[in-house]
Image (cartoon, helix red, strand yellow):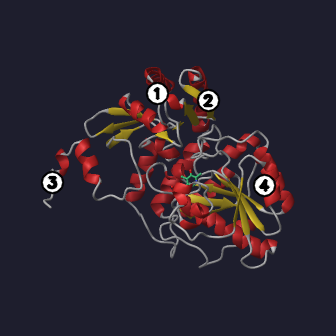
Amino acid sequence: MTAPARVPVRTRTSADLIRAEEPVLAHNYHPLPVVVARAEGAWVEDVEGRRYLDMLAGYSALNFGHRHPRLIEAAHRQLDRLTLTSRAFHHDKLAEFAERLAALTGLDMVLPMNTGAEAVESGIKVARKWAYEVKGVPADRATIVVAADNFHGRTTTIVSFSTDETARAGFGPFTPGFRVVPYNDLAALEAAVDETTAAVLIEPIQGEAGVVIPDQGYLTGVRELTRRTGCLFVADEIQSGLGRTGRTLAVEHESVVPDVLLLGKALGGGIVPVSAVVADREVLGVLRPGEHGSTFGGNPLSAAVGTAVVELLETGEFQRRAAELGVILRDGLAELVGKGVLGFRARGLWAGVDIDPALGTGREVSHHLMREGVLVKDTHGSTIRLAPPLTITAEELATALGALERVLRRG
Ligand SMILES: *Cc1c(COP(=O)(O)O)cnc(C)c1O
């Protein structure tokens, strides 16, 4: 077999780069054929200089847009001073990050991690330990109740309680100790909770499932049920949190305070992976030295960027933008119902849009939108997800909605 001639890196076109990935990159993704080379705000630019409006924003990891000046400045400043110590030593950035994140969420303590999946894993460990030490569940008997159609990440334990066969098949044996109930169903939840239950773990809005918003009263019901039965309410706000829905946290729409909050994605400002488990002292206090950790968790660069993210959220500006621009998004989508859109669910700057399957799959619609200069991602079947940076302008949002209308009109 003769190897194809290597094209010098600097002159590779988008098509060259896509072809070059195939033999050397694991095929666990199926990206749209766009090769991004630079970005700013709500816009990305490909290798050939074509510009696209980013209506996915890294699944909410880019809530503040690409390269927000305040976040880039915080990262640069930290890169010039100190990047990593490990938690074997203290460093001068961690206290402020934890103080400000705890204050932002109204809880006591922070366990810093890196990716969302690690925050979920850590939340599961903390809930189990709390069940044994505080609640008195017999050793190795703790259960955690989760919702069908959840998405909490990709580790072996997390896919153990996924109901998505594509995410699970071929990856067993699975971690025991999870009970799956339908989402948005308090009676089913109540039936699944017993004296072994450490926690109920849910997304306040199910993102990957297609931005599924539970009925008003569900989160209040989960809070009431978990309090009454003596288990923890763990809210995975990795995608829904940090401004996306028009509030700092999605649980605020029902004025609910969970026992354990899982944060990630936007916490890293689109620069570094930063996640956290946030909880009160009675819960996070169960962890003692040596029982849990992470080499990179809470490193100085992550703490500096995370602190800058919290500072942006302290202004309330992004939550306000998400709420106000969310009205434009909702109204724009409502206009398209019956014109290629079957229905949609939206809260803040976040929407799951069900496209008429006769017009194509979500993937095909995403492809057409890409040609129109708008980047989105399909979720399941004919549903696409819109989650633009919270820095997007009303005009840019109108541009995206206009492109969607054109794509649907053409069919
Ligand atoms: C993305 C996501 C995760 C996993 O985060 P990673 O950083 O990809 O590991 C967990 N929970 C929710 C709700 C998410 O959206």
The residue at the point 57 percent across, 25 percent down is: 333
Gap between marks 2 and 3 measured at Cα: 48 Å
Q: Do the residues labelled 2 and 1 touch (CB within 8 Å)?
A: no
Q: The C terminus is located in which quarter?
A: top left
The residue at label 1 has a CB less than 8 Å from ligand 1: no
Which residue, given by chain and number where applicable, does mark 4 sit on? 189
Q: Which amino acid type is shown beneath numbered disc 2? A: Gly
Gap between marks 4 and 2 measured at Cα: 27 Å
Which residue, given by chain and number where applicable, does mark 1 sit on? 400
Q: Are marks 2 and 3 in contact (CB under 8 Å)?
A: no
Q: Is residue 329 visible?
A: no
Placement of 191 over or under 124, stated as above or below: above
**Coordinates of residue 110 in the picture (x, y in percent):** 63, 62
The reply, left or right, for residue 292 in relation to residue 280 is left
Q: How crowded is mark 1: few (under 14 residues within 10 Å), some or many (20 or more)?
A: many
Gap between marks 2 and 1 measured at Cα: 18 Å
Which residue, given by chain and number where applicable, does mark 2 sit on? 343
Gap between marks 1 and 4 measured at Cα: 39 Å
Placement of 58 over or under 125, stated as above or below: above
Dot 2 or dot 1, earlier in sequence = 2
Which residue, given by chain and number where applicable, does mark 3 sit on? 6
Gap between marks 4 and 3 measured at Cα: 57 Å
Labels 2, 3: front one: 2
Q: Which amino acid type is shown beneath numbered disc 3? A: Arg
Q: Are marks 1 and 4 in contact (CB under 8 Å)?
A: no
The residue at the point 82 percent across, 65 percent down is: 194
Q: What element carries label 2?
A: strand
Q: Which amino acid type is shown beneath numbered disc 4? A: Leu
The residue at label 3 has a CB less than 8 Å from ligand 1: no
